Image: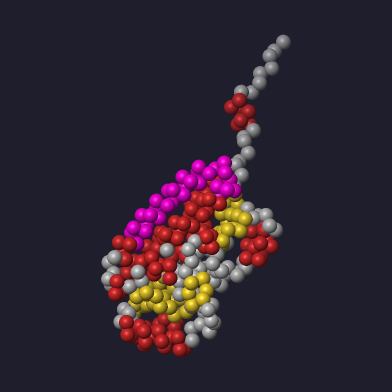
Amino acid sequence: MKKLLLPSAWLLASLCPAPAATRINIASFSTILTEIAEKVGGDHVTVFALVKPGVDPHEYEPTPSDLKRVSDAQLILTSGKHLENYLNKLQEASGGKAELLKVGDLLPSLTMKAEEGSSGMTLDPHWWNSVTNVEQATRVVRDELSRLDPADKADFAKNAEAYLAQLDDLNRWVKRKVAELPRDKRKLVTSHDAFQYFAREYGFSISAIEGVSTETEPSNRHVAELIDRIRKEGVKAIFTESTLNPKVTKEITRETGAKVGGVLDVDGLGTVEASTYEGMVRHNVSTIVDALK
């Protein structure tokens, strides 16, 4: 009688591979948070980037296909600080199954004057223009992923540490680059008011053509006051933005003699050299400093 030969363990494993590890599905409504989630989550996450590079987040509205992605997600990442006006839609689409993490709400806030014609103050939502804030946002995302998937906590910590080291190097570079510009030359005029966190961290004063949002057109009175300020302070350059029409900016340069110093990526990642957070920061800071020197 012949013996029945049993397959070896390795053969059984090859015939019946173990199921793939379950990934955390993340729906991200911020290009900055998409990068953070990918860097920290690594192979343990799948990130659906619903706000794409080069898209103005002030004017973005989720599409039905975006909301379908939300319904499949376990974690929803938003910028917070009242930037997104569609949070109710996201919560309805998730059916209460996903965690909604408004990352900016967990970071220090700056207040600023509300839109022209409105009274009172509002939160500045552009926290990512401070590298220090992005470091803190990285820790927030790390902690949330660790809570959702404690088995992979060590990997999230390791990945976050590597990304934080990169951000530390970037912040040191920004400080060296800004130091090339005398403090009395650190006067930044931009298309809309998005650099308050940057200004506080690196010692700039800010003037903006539009307010905190890109959706409101500046009044003639505001433009006239800004032209007068640029003339009095001898501002050398003003800056346009990759997602905004530069028409008013060009009018101001004609009236003041200031030049257009370059195009900035302000509301999130852009394309080409600004397609990563480090690339965006290096592009913006180099453009600002080199034009104002």
User: In the image, residue 163 lies at what x, y percent?
Assistant: 43, 51
Q: Is residue 244 visible?
A: no
Q: How many numbered marks are there?
A: 0
Horizontal and vertical percent for residue 249? 42, 81
Residue 3 shows in this picture: yes
Question: How did the renderer colour the structure?
Answer: secondary structure
Magenta span: helix, strand or loop, mainly?
A: helix
> Horizontally, is 20 left or right of 166 in the view?
right
Q: Position of residue 133 (x, y in %)?
A: 45, 60
Image coordinates of residue 265 in percent, x first then y, are 44, 68
> Residue, x 39% and y 77% (percent of image)?
189
Q: Is residue 64 magenta?
A: no
Residue at 50% over, 46% down: 156
Q: Looking at the image, which residue is at 45% across and 86% down? A: 222
State whether residue 133 is above or below residue 2: below
**Which quadrant is the N terminus positioned in?**
top right
Placement of the C terminus among the 4 image quadrants? bottom left
Residue 135 found in image quarter: bottom left
Most foreground residue, 132 or 129: 132
Q: Quadrant of residue 248?
A: bottom left
Q: Is residue 158 magenta?
A: yes
Find the residue positioned furthest to the top: 1
Find the magenta span and give its range.
Answer: 145-174
Q: Residue at x 70, y 12 (%)?
A: 2
The image quadrant of residue 194 is bottom left
Most distant residue in the front direction: 120
